[in-house]
């Protein structure tokens, strides 16, 4: 898992983004992903960060369900990216 930090006026200061979570296929469903998310949440709380974000591909409904069970909610915006290099 990679956890990055930014600054957001909307979220009142420093916010965090789970940039990547990867669990090898043979270990999926074992609770490792949920433990990683919980670690990110605990870390953010300890740092005084109020907002934790992540992104998930639209077609990955199973993964979206996992994140919803972890307490994440849909944010009715689209992530847009411009590659600079």
Image: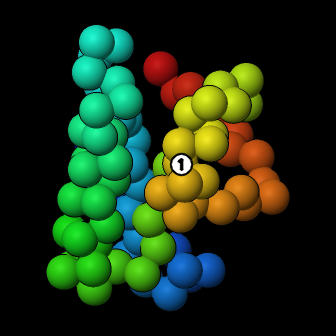
Q: Is residue 63 above or below residue 59?
A: below
Q: Position of residue 5 (x, y in %)?
A: 33, 61
**Looking at the image, which is closer to me, 30 or 54?**
30
Residue situated furthest front in the rendering: 30
| Residue under the image location 41 percent in, 70 percent down | 15
17 lies above or below 9: above
Above or below 45: residue 30: above
Residue at the (60%, 53%) spot, across then down: 68
**15, above or below 80, in the image:** below
**Residue at coordinates 48% horizontally, 57% vertically from top-left?**
70
Q: Residue furthest top?
A: 26
Give the crowd class for mark 1: few <14, some 14-19, many >=20 residues within 10 Å: some
Q: Is residue 45 found left or right of 58 in the rendered image?
A: left
Q: Is residue 65 left or right of residue 1?
A: right
Rendering coords of residue 55 (x, y %): 56, 42
**Near-viewer residue (12 or 71):** 71
How many numbered discs sit on the rendered protein? 1
Tell me residue 11's x, y (percent).
54, 80
Residue identifier under label 1: 67
- The location of residue 64, given as percent across then percent down, is 62, 40
| Front in this rendered view, residue 35 or 5 | 35
The residue depicted at 41 percent of the width and 54 percent of the height is: 17
């Amino acid at each position: 898992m990679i956890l990055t930090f930014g600054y957001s006026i909307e979220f009142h200061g420093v916010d965090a983004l789970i940039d990547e979570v990867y669990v090898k296929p043979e270990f999926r469903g074992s609770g490792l992903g949920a433990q990683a998310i919980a670690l990110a949440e605990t870390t953010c709380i300890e740092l005084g960060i109020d907002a934790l974000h992540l992104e998930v591909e639209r077609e990955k409904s199973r993964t979206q369900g996992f994140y919803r069970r972890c307490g994440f909610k849909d944010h009715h915006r689209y992530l847009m990216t411009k590659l600079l290099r």
